[in-house]
Amino acid sequence: MSQIYLFIGENRYELGKERSRWIQEFTEKHGPENLLVVEGKDAQFSLLINEVSTAPFIAEKRLVVIDGLPKIDKDQLKALASSIHPQTLLLIIEPSPDKRLSVTKELMAIATVKTFTPLRGSALIAWLAPSLGQREATKLIAMVGEDQLLLANEVQKLTTYAGDRPVTCEDIENLVMLSTEKAVWQLMDLLGAKKREEALQFTETILKRGENPHGLWSMFLWMVAQFSQVAAQVIEGNTNPQSIAKACGMHPNTARNLISLAQSYDHKRLLHLITLVIDSDIKLKTGGFKATDQSPEELNAILDTRIAAVI
């Protein structure tokens, strides 16, 4: 049986939980003096050889945990494997190994591999069921995505807030911040649908929930860049989402959502928007506007006026 174990997979929550279980159960049985945890990226090959070849101290087993695949080649991996003491176990944690590398192929061939696959759809809702109702679970996933680690953190926050009563959708709306990715797309959808007041209200809401205004400004710059490309195509007479997407290197749905707004633009208005946003960005970065993390009021006002200017 292999003395090398490899944990891989994108489910950071379950992977982390299993890693913690291994360490806890091992130290309870064999003592903390027989456990070593090292960062793979910082580990020298000579150190690893010494540690895996060391016998346990007055115990049956020794465990060496390496977080991240160390910077070694295939031959060094073979040397490491052949140096492991008969009573030592080696656990390597590498959520996303590069399977193109020969060292990774060799490791996966000689190790006992455990893969942690993310839960999706109904399985994820069922996982949340002990803490949330189906409606609330669906709402939470829609807001933060399917990352179980993020979901677990949000559930802990929500259940602590709710206390003895069930968590409600209103709790989720009040306490949970949209993931950055979802916030970008929701704001873009509102802009594309020419819903000025809703876009401004959405911006105010996510800022109140803790979104960094500088981060939101960066999102807005990206959105303006995407919109400008679509608008330029529409002004030239191209209104086909597939054609625009291909010309601009974006997803067809992005192009489709922005076409209606782009049709209200001509060259003059598009140039005015681009000039306004670029000038604002320059002033933010050179001190023309007084906007800091401690005093973001001016940046918040700039966000409002620039977002309103798009529609």
Image (tube, helix red, strand yellow):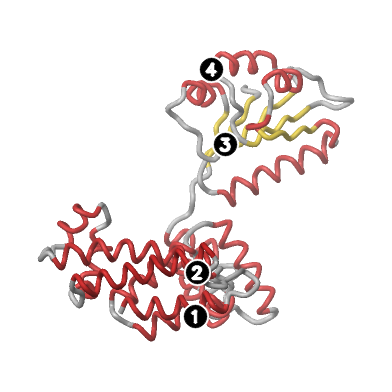
SS of the residue under disc 4: helix
Task: Please state, as top left, top right, bottom left or bottom right, where the C terminus lies in the image.
Answer: bottom left
Q: Amino acid at mark 4?
A: Lys
Is residue 295 shown left or right of residue 303? right
Residue located 70% across and 22% down the image: 48
Which of the 4 image quarters holds residue 1?
A: top right
Lower sequence index among marks 2 and 3: 3
Which of the 4 image quarters holds residue 264?
A: bottom left
Q: Which residue is mark 2?
A: 178
Q: Which residue is mark 4?
A: 74
Q: How far is the residue under mark 4 from the one under mark 2?
A: 43 Å
SS of the residue under disc 1: helix
Measured from the top left, where is residue 152 in percent x and y?
60, 61
Lower sequence index among marks 4 and 1: 4
Q: Nearer the viewer, residue 292 or 237?
A: 292
Residue located 17% across and 62% down the image: 233
Lower sequence index among marks 2 and 1: 2
Of labels 2 and 1, the one closer to you: 1
Of labels 4 and 1, the one closer to you: 1
Q: Which residue is mark 3?
A: 94
Q: How far is the residue under mark 2 from the one under mark 3?
A: 28 Å
Measured from the top left, where is residue 234 in percent x and y?
16, 67
